[in-house]
Amino acid sequence: MKLRIAAAVAVIFMIIAAASCEVTEHVPGEAVPRQAGFLETDIGTELTADLPDADYEGYNFRILHWHNDEDGGESVFGRDLVSHEETGDLINDAVYRRNLRVTGRLNIAISAEYQDCGVIASNVINMVTAADDAFDLVYIRTCEVPSVITGKFLSDFKKLPHVDLKKPWWDANAADNLSIAGKLYLAASDINVIDRDATSVILFNRNMAAGPKLPDLYYMVQDGRWTIDAMVSLYKDAAGDVDGVMGEEVWGFIAGRDVSAVLFNGAGSLFASKDGKDLPVSAFESEYNYAVTDKIIEIMNDRYNNTGTGDAEYRRMFEDGQGLFFLTRLAGVTALRGSETDFGILPVPKYRESQERYYNPVSIHTSGLMSVPLSASDPERTSVILETMAYESSSTVQPAYKESVLRGKYARDDESSAALDIIFANRVFDMGIIFGFGGIAEAYESTEQVKNGAASLYAQKAAATEEDINAFIKQMETEQD
C-alpha cells in the first residue's frame, strides 16, 4: 500500500510542479516582498528592559501551572518555567540559562507547582478569596479561565508598574485581543512556549517522492497569495489526473479537531470582537462570515479531504505520506521532526488575497496564558521579575524554541523560519471562543450543526449570544472590591 501511496504522490507532485508555472515564482537573488507581520531584524539596535536595580534577598518567586496527565503532564506543559540543570535539550537548557540570569540579577529563586487542569481554576479562586499569598503567578488552561476573570480574582497587567507591554517580548496581539474595558488579565510573553505550541499552522509534505518540486509556497505566503482557494486548487488539479487515488489513500487536506474554527479565524473572522469601550460584541453575523463559512463547509465535505477528530490519527496519516496539506498546532510539528517526513511550515491560509494579513489562532484547549492573582502581596516586585524574565527569554527561550521546531534529521529550513516569524507576529485570540458566548463557537465545530450555513446557525444562537455578552459586560463593569 505504501508503494502505491508513494507512486501516487509522485504523480501528484509532478502535476503540482507543472501547475506552479502558472504563478509568479521567486527568482533566486531577488528580494522577496514581505507580508504584513514579517519580522525584520535591526542588528544595529538592541532593546533593553528599563528596570530598577533590585535585590530581593533570596525571595522565592512561586508559579502555579496547569497540567493534563492525558496529554503528557508537566513534562509537556511545564517545560518553560523551571530547569535545575543543563541536559542537552534545547528548551530545558534555554530555561536554565534564562533563570540563571534572572535569579542572579535579582537575587531570587524560581519554583513551580503543577495542578490538574480540572481543579486549578477553582483552587485559584479559593486562594484569592482567602487572601492566601501562595503564588505570585498562575497559569490556568485558557478554556477554564473565564470564571476567574469574571469573578475579579486577577490583577490588571496594565497596572503592574514595571511591565512594559509595548516591548517586543510581550505579545501585542494578545494584549489587544484580550483586554476588557481597558484592563488586561491574561498576557502572553516570550517567557513561555506553551502558547507557541498551541498556535495553528499548515504543514505541506515535500519528500514523499524523490525529485518532484512543490511550487514556491513560501513566496506565495510572503506575496500575500496563500489562500484557501490556492491550497484547494493545488490538490484538486493534481487529483483530476490521478482520480481514484486522491481521496482514498492520499488526501489533499487533513485536519483534526478545531478545523472549522481555525479556518474561520484564519479568514480574519471572529466570533466576538470589541466595541469602542473595549467591551465584547457579537461579530458573527455578516455576509463575509457567511461566505467564509460556506467555503469551510465545502472544504470539510470535499471528497479529497479527511477532517474530524483525533489529532494523533491525522498526524500519523501525514507522517505516513497520506496527506498533502495538514492543519495542526506547532506542538505537532515538534513531534513530527523525528519522523522520516520532510515538510515545510506555513501560516493558516487567508480567505482571499485582499485580506490584510494572515491570522493564526491559538487553541484554548492546549494553551495557558499568565495571570497575576489578586492575592499576590507585592505587585511591584512581581512586575520587575516578570519584565526581567520576559526580556531574558527573548534571547534565550524563544530562539531555542524556534530552533527546536525547525530542527530535525534534515538541514535547517530557513524558509520555514521566515514563515514562523509571520505566524508568531499574527496570532489571534478570539474572545468569543475563550468565553463561549452563546455556545456559537462550540457549535461551529460541529459539521452537523453548521452544515445548513452560518445564517441558520446564528439564528439558533443569536439570543443566547447576546444574553451571555450582556451578562459578561455587567460582571466586568462591576467595580472591583
Image: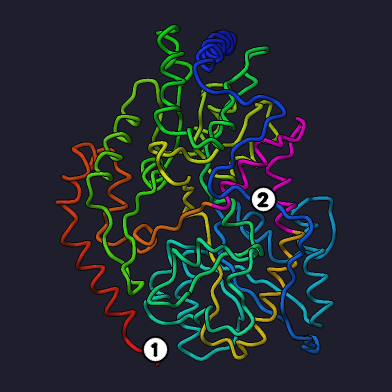
For the residue marked with disc 1, what is the amino acid? Gln
Residue 5 seen in the current view: no
Above or below, 368 against 337 in this view is below
Above or below, 55 against 416 in this view is below
Let me know if residue 330 is in the magenta part. no
Question: As rendered, which of 462 and 164 lies closer to the eye?
Answer: 164
The image quadrant of residue 407 is top right
Q: Residue at x 56, y 10 (%)?
A: 14
The magenta-colored residue range is 397-425
The image quadrant of residue 477 is bottom left
Query: Which part of the image, by quadrant, shows the N terminus?
Result: top right
Q: Nearer the viewer, mark 1 or mark 2?
A: 2
Q: Residues within 10 Å of mark 2 (few under 14, many from 20)?
A: few
In this rendering, position of residue 218 left or right of residue 361? right
Where residue 184 sits in the image (x, y, percent)? 47, 74
Separation of marks 1 and 2 at Cα, in angstroms:
41 Å
- Element assignment for label 2: loop
Q: Residue at x 43, y 39 (%)?
A: 350
Where residue 402 sits in the image (x, y, percent)? 69, 48
For the residue marked with disc 2, what is the amino acid? Glu
- First of labels 1, 2 by sequence position: 2
Query: Which part of the image, by quadrant, shows the C terminus?
Result: bottom left
Where residue 35 sits in the image (x, y, percent)? 55, 43
Residue 351 seen in the current view: yes
Tell me, for residue 40, which label it has, or none: 2
| Residue underneath mark 1 | 480
